Amino acid sequence: MKGRLSATRFARLTVKRGLHLLFVLWGISVITFGMVCLAPGDPAEVMLAARNDAPSPEKVAALRQELGLDDPLWLRYIRWLGHAVVLDLGRSYKTGEPVSREILSRLPATLELALSTFAFVVIFSTLSGVVSALCRDRMPDRLGRAGAILSISLPDYWLGLLLIFFLSLRLGLFPVMGREGAASFVLPVLTLGLSIAAVQGRVLRAGIIEIMSRDHVRFAHAKGLSQRSVFRRHVLRNALPPILTLWGMCLGHLLGGAVVVETVFSWPGLGKLSVEAVLNRDFPLIQGAVLFMALCYVVASQVTDLICRLLDPRISEGRA
């Protein structure tokens, strides 16, 4: 009976999160559509320029009418939303290809970079958090704290340029840019992941130290359990749920496309596609890319939240 009740509550929570996800996506679509429409530049002129056609007033007016750009803003939004609901995000002004095809063509590169960086973040943050907590206020902890402050203080684009200068141009260890071979992942992954892993490592360290001071951990030691057993069963298990939430948010952020890093390293992913769309005033592509990146982020965060509630029911009951 208790299991069925838990399953029912979980189903209700899933439905509630799904509705919340739809509401968030709708809000993002409204904001994105409004910002794109208010941006300077005439889409008709952009399309004519992409076709190497002189944008005379007559041609611009005819194309605006064909695209429905003279219609009221609300009518244009409803028309765009109606197509987006059936996964039709329009066609790129620059290439004429469907926006969904453009996004899917760049998705593999972003997935590879995001998952590689995510694996680095999980491993590095766990190791640094555990070592710093076990060596509290000693040299490894101090080095971890200094490294965290340094990596957080450096902007991604600046860190990327430093890594390119020292590890590529000076030492010749890794390629400067592009996506060819395992070596090409090293610099983008370090640029993206170092600051994230450093922050999450400090969060895990704080959680472990706080849990190690609780009564049930002292009681486990008093029962004669080994240090390793107490740490694994009573400390690490309770310290992981909060960091799981951060990992989920990190994955959503990475899947959404790392705009700056992909641009610095000429990585052919969604982030670089978005920058190119903005520079080309390719409005359908901007809307589609932003909506897709928002979808990745929201879905990842919602799924992570559900997993945390499954692992720790106290979160649902407000006792965590």
Image (tube, rainbow, N blue to C red):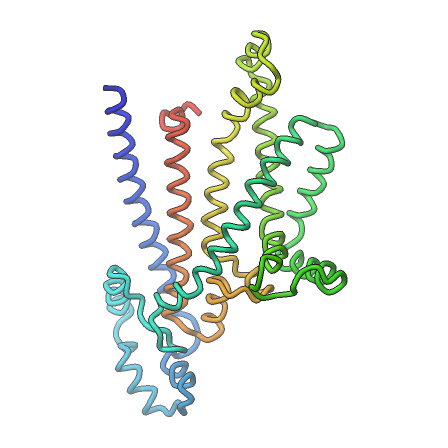
| Rendered location of residue 305, percent (x, y) | 40, 37
The answer to which quarter of the image holds residue 90 is: bottom left
| x, y percent for residue 54 | 41, 92
Q: Residue at 56% of width from left, 16% of height from top?
A: 214
Q: Quadrant of residue 228?
A: top right
In percent of the image, x 41 and y 39: which residue is there?
Answer: 304
Q: Is residue 145 left or right of residue 18?
A: right
| Farthest top residue in view | 223
Residue 63, relative to residue 301: is it above or below?
A: below
Q: How many marks?
A: 0
Identify the residue at image location x=57%, y=64%: 180
Q: Quadrant of the C terminus?
A: top left
- Tell me where residue 61 sits by quadrant: bottom left
- Image location (x, y in percent) of residue 59: 33, 90
Vertically, is 279 above or below 174? below
Choose between 317 and 101: the one closer to the eye.
101
Q: Is 195 left or right of 98, judged from the image as shown?
A: right
Kindly give the residue lying farthest to the front in the view shown: 181
Vertical placement of 316 versus 265: above or below? above
147 relative position to 201: left or right? right
Quadrant of the snapshot with the N terminus: top left
The image shows residue 200 at horizontal and vertical percentages of 57, 39
Judge by depth and name the residue closer to the eye, 182 or 257: 182
In this rendering, is residue 146 above or below 222?
below
